[in-house]
């Protein structure tokens, strides 16, 4: 028998009961069975511990050994992470495939960073320099789009000694030693090991004053998410949650994308891998995968690893935030994560709360979303983590616990509508059920980048859409033809806003992304037509005459024209020409 005091007493799915001693520490990593399956201690009572195992437990038997490590579940952080696909506990899948084939063998232990790859390293410090936590001491051009900045760990400070010159080193090579006031030395390599459930420290949390710009008109104009903020995308199956997150990952102005596939179908993750490898980054023309990190924990993988995967993704995002990057974390989906939490809670025989979810579901959601933020790093720089979490309520019921508790911790809510998705309206975000609390925080940024008067313009657009919603109830009863012309004009203008502005073609080369100035230009032209048409209506000119000129149809196609070289002034002149023609015909 192996030399360990701990033995398996019982196995219940991913939950293993361990006996043999009182030395197990809660939340510490253990190796279970002769195959040394990774697991985490979730409960300790007397001489009995409960372990959730991150692998399939089939074949484990009572009496097999359990090996404590004394360390928490951690991830190795260092150069070579960008462009890599990890599983839920940060094991690189490509490295596993090279060592063991296409299927992940149980108990495999592969470091998250390639320790043998040699990098061209630029060392930024000299002998005798005072080093503080978070300070960058070495740089590596990790990909064509990302420079990796090796930092002094948060709990290390002192004087640099035995500093090596710039040159070629592996991630495990010691670059220098840090000597503290007592003469103790700590070696610095380009790698750090960090427990995934512990937030990485920062100097200060800064106010959010700018949005995460996405190029998606309905998001940027009506429902922005602040850079460093949190957004939720709830919607039923088929409403387009994953496609919205794909679009954001392609086009948002974050420096690093961490895409977390939590409990999603394997073919969706395959699609992400294939697309991101082929897509060109609009900022530098390089493959999008050169600034993307993927975490794939698909629906057929162990549920315990799914529960840990969102903390793995957040820890990686915080690491790049500490380098001074702006990171966008796409979590798809937190509902699948909550289902894993529910299954593990049931195996642990904990008292269930609403819909059998554990009573600590809100606190776990809070611990995840509250790690987002716009931060002043330990070294004095700035970085951010923006979290965009998809929620998949069963049957599209937004009153279920995961959606309701998520709304408590996010300030942007993008409610997807199945009827819009089936009508080919993308993004299928329902403007009546969505909201954003970041707009006022980012007011100055909008006035500077979109143009003066944008706030007023946005309020008018929102008012039009709300008025249209009320009028549609009347139209359902009596029809549109009996409405007065001013109300018909509201419906016609709102239709341009819905179909010509809010609807966006993700596969069209010019409509898939729109810069801020062009978004502002579209709104200015639409409201210019509305104001001119109201003057005609006030003169008793039928709005049908203006519609007959084709100007409403022309503006509905304006988004394509702006991408093909036309300007806002061209469309303003088109509106003026149509209005003048109608005015002259009624003189």
Image (spheres, rainbow, N blue to C red):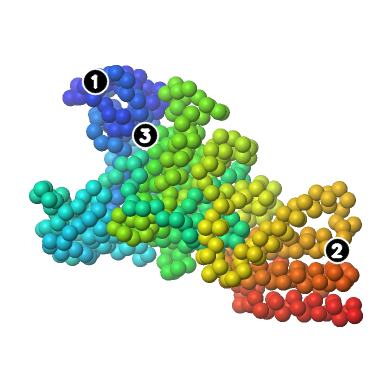
The relative height of residue 215 versus residue 407 in the rendered view (above or below) is below
Q: Which residue is mark 2?
A: 485
Lower position in the chain sequence, tag 1 or tag 2: 1
- Tag 2 secondary structure: helix
Image disc number at residue 54: 3
The relative height of residue 428 versus residue 361 in the rendered view (above or below) is below
**CA gap, disc 1 and disc 3:** 22 Å
**CA gap, disc 1 and disc 2:** 82 Å
Q: Nearer the viewer, mark 1 or mark 2?
A: 2
Q: In the image, what residue occupies the spot 55% across and 50% down?
A: 412
Q: Residues within 10 Å of mark 1 (few under 14, many from 20)?
A: some
Q: Residues within 10 Å of mark 2 (few under 14, many from 20)?
A: some
Q: In the image, what residue occupies the spot 27% across and 55% down?
A: 134
Q: Which residue is mark 1?
A: 21
Tell me which corner region of the image, top left, top right, bottom left or bottom right, holds residue 149: bottom left
- What quarter of the picture does the C terminus occupy? bottom right
Does the image show residue 508? Answer: no
x, y percent for residue 381: 33, 60
The relative height of residue 62 versus residue 451 in the rendered view (above or below) is above
Residue positioned most to the left: 183
Q: In the image, what residue occupies the spot 61% across and 64% down?
A: 455
- Tag 1 secondary structure: loop
């Amino acid at each position: 028998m192996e030399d360990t005091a701990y033995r398996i007493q019982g196995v219940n799915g991913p939950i293993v009961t361990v006996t043999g001693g009182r030395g197990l520490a809660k939340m510490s990593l253990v190796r279970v069975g002769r195959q040394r399956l990774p697991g985490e201690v979730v409960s300790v009572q007397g001489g009995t511990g409960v372990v959730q195992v991150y692998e399939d437990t089939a074949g484990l038997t009572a009496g097999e050994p359990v090996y404590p490590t004394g360390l928490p579940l951690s991830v190795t952080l260092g150069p070579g992470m960008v462009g890599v696909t990890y599983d839920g506990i940060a094991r690189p899948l490509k490295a596993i495939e090279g060592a063991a084939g296409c299927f992940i063998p149980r108990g495999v232990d592969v470091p998250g960073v390639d320790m043998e790859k040699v990098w061209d390293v630029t060392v930024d410090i000299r002998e005798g320099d005072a080093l503080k936590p978070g300070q960058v001491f070495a740089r590596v051009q990790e990909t064509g789009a990302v420079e990796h900045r090796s930092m002094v760990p948060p709990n290390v400070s002192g004087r640099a000694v035995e500093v090596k010159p710039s040159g070629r080193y592996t991630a495990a090579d010691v670059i220098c030693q840090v000597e503290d006031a007592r003469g103790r030395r700590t070696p610095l390599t380009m790698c750090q090991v960090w427990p995934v459930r512990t937030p990485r420290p920062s100097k200060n949390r800064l106010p959010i004053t700018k949005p995460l710009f996405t190029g998606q008109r309905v998001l940027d104009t009506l429902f922005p998410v602040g850079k460093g903020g949190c957004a939720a995308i709830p919607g039923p199956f088929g409403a387009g949650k994953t496609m919205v997150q794909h679009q954001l990952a392609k086009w948002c102005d974050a420096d690093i994308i961490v895409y977390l596939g939590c409990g999603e179908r394997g073919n969706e993750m395959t699609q992400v891998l294939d697309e991101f490898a082929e897509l060109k980054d609009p900022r530098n023309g390089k493959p999008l995968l050169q600034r993307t990190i993927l975490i794939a924990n698909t629906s057929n993988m162990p549920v315990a690893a799914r529960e840990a995967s969102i903390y793995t993704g957040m820890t990686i995002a915080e690491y790049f935030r500490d380098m001074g990057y702006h990171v966008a974390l796409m979590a798809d989906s937190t509902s699948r994560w909550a289902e894993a939490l529910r299954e593990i809670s049931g195996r642990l025989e904990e008292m269930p709360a609403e819909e059998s979810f554990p009573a600590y579901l809100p606190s776990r959601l809070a611990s995840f979303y509250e790690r987002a933020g716009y931060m002043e790093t330990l070294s004095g720089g700035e970085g951010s983590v923006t979290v965009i979490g998809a929620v998949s309520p069963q049957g599209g019921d937004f009153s279920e616990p995961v959606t309701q508790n998520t709304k408590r911790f996010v300030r942007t809510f993008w409610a997807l509508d199945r009827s819009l998705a089936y009508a080919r309206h993308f993004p299928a975000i329902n403007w009546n059920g969505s909201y954003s609390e970041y707009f006022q925080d980012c007011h100055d940024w909008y006035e500077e980048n979109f143009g003066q008067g944008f706030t007023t313009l946005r309020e008018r657009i929102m008012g039009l859409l709300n008025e249209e919603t009320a009028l549609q109830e009347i139209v359902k009863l009596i029809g549109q033809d009996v409405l007065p012309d001013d109300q018909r004009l509201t419906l016609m203008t709102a239709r341009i806003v819905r179909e010509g502005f809010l609807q966006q073609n993700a596969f069209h080369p010019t409509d898939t992304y729109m810069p801020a100035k062009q978004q502002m230009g579209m709104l200015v032209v639409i409201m210019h037509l509305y104001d001119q048409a109201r003057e005609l209506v006030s003169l008793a000119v039928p709005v049908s005459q203006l519609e007959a000129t084709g100007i409403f149809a022309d503006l509905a196609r304006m988004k394509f024209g702006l991408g093909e070289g036309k300007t806002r002034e061209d469309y303003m002149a088109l509106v003026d020409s149509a209005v003048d023609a109608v005015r002259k015909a009624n003189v």
